[in-house]
Image: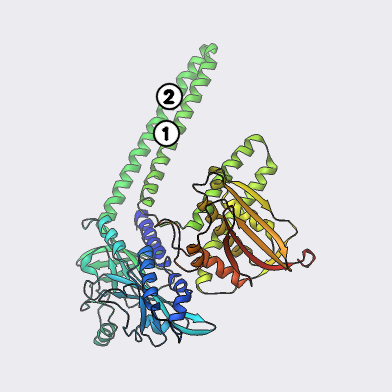
Amino acid sequence: MDDVSLQQLGLYAGELESELSRYDFLPSIVGLDNDILALLGENAQPGLREKVNQRLATLNVKANTLAIYVMDASGMVVAASNGYLAESLVGADYSSRPYFLEAIRGESARYFAADPTRGAPEFYFAQSILHKGRVLGVAAAKISLEPMESSWIASIPRSGYMKLLVVDENDVIVMSSVKEWKYRTMHSLSAAEYVKLMGTAKYPQVLTSLGAIVGQALKHGTHLVTLNEKKYIAQERFLLRSDWRLIVFSDVAEVRRSARQAALGAGVLIGFIGLLGMYLRQRYRGVAQQLAAREALQRAHDQLEMKVEERTAELLRANMELVQAGKLALLGQMSASITHEINQPLTALRSSFYNTQLLLKRGNLEGVEKNLKSMSDLIGRMGKITGQLKSFARKTPSANRPVQLEKAVTNALLVLENRIQTENVELQIDVSPTLFALCDDSRLEQVLLNLCSNALDAMKDAVRKTMSIEAKIVEGRVKLIVSDTGPGLSMESMSHLFEPFFSTKAPGEGLGLGLVISANIVREFGGSLRGRSDDVGAVFEFDLEFMEENHV
């Protein structure tokens, strides 16, 4: 199989895995809403259902999902993002839905089912809602994979030599760049298999076999496949956290034609290099003969030889760059969204890299070593950030240990360093290096990063921009305080401050989940996160268990 098809297989698989991973945490966040917990309780207040429906409708728009809904422990839908419509899901009985049955047992559920009328591929995410160790119900979100499938169809012409398809655990094609292949099986079905598959109600039509005949195995895990008397080379890849496979069919005739063209191009290039080499050798001999007679031209010969060698090297580099440009153009056809938490460390890495270059030019090796250590820490923390959101969704406990607060503050500010300098923000830091607290360092940095980011957002239009971070011991506990000189918090904002999905930012700039996640992390540390306004701006503070330095 050619390198282009292999690269595209990886790109398409990465795009699909990224799209599915984006929504894993959403049902867990829904389950944190106090109003939803109250709605699932025994004494729900009048009008609470309408309030929750409206909140789910807002989240549904922001998250770009098809529907978000909540079911009680019996499987009855009690609130939904379309609760205000005539065709509302509220009141529907989903107790037999596979994702409900899996989530009510306390597990995270993923489930595929096609739209029964249009056949569009849809995916469900579900998570149990827990309160004080008791399962109250299940939160679920539904998304459509149709936009991604449409982009595949648009980017892969029907006349092209490559076909793309996604096969589920039942060997049924659920997504494809060829519409006619959807919801057909890769192998012929027995009568028992047919009855079983149709009984799942996952597929919108009568299932028939694609008729693909798998032939000999080739290298690198590829297979020769015959379909409609046409031969293809098939390469497949399993998707993470699912039994789905992504398969690329490449037309054998087109692959051979591409190989011949590549070989011809390589032959032309080799011939050109050979002619160039002959010319250079002849040129060198002529100059050498002249130098024997006229030693005065030695310096001119040296300069000419140097220019020829430089030009030859430039030509070789240009050829390599053309090859690399082709690969990068292919990679540039698709890109997954980079989350806010990852983008910030990347910005800091770029800034640190630039500073390292300057320090090298100045010969400041001590500064270079410090920068490289910071860059290494940033790279490690990027891996931790993605794991933190997953661990938060699974409600796994923190690995608490004594943490130096000054270091945690420094690491959080390092991520925001470029933004702080660009926006001319004055920093006031009062954190003693002798202060230690019992918590998890990476999750503490996540809280500090969120509070500092919010402070910078609040001071966007402020005349005076000052952000202060202070740590002090109050009644045997460490209190961390982050304040800014922004417009402060209104009374209305303070009453909804730690509610999921509430945000004072402009539409599209956030889901209103940052403070909810931060408050939950601090709560796991045994503290509480609070917000208020003073005569300067907004103030957020939280307390942690103090650790003596000699106990560290």
> How many marks are shown on the rendered structure?
2
Q: Nearer the viewer, mark 2 or mark 1?
A: 1
For the residues marked 2 and 1, what is the alpha-carbon distance in whole angstroms?
Answer: 19 Å
Residue at coordinates 55% horizontally, 49% vertically from top-left? 348
Quadrant for the N terminus in the image: bottom left
In the rendered view, tell whether residue 136 sits above or below residue 456. below
Disc 1 element: helix
Residue at coordinates 44% horizontally, 63% vertically from top-left? 511
Q: Nearer the viewer, residue 54 or 292?
A: 54
Badge 1 is on which residue? 315
Badge 2 is on which residue? 282
Q: Which mark is residue 469?
A: none
Specify the amino acid type for callout 2: Gln
- Quarter occupied by residue 245: bottom left
- First in residue order: circle 2 vs circle 1: 2
Specify the amino acid type for callout 1: Leu
Residue at coordinates 38% horizontally, 41% vertically from top-left? 322
Residue at coordinates 29% horizontally, 62% vertically from top-left? 147
Colour scheme shown? rainbow
In the rendered view, tell whether residue 365 sits above or below residue 407. above
Q: Position of residue 551 (x, y in %)?
A: 78, 68
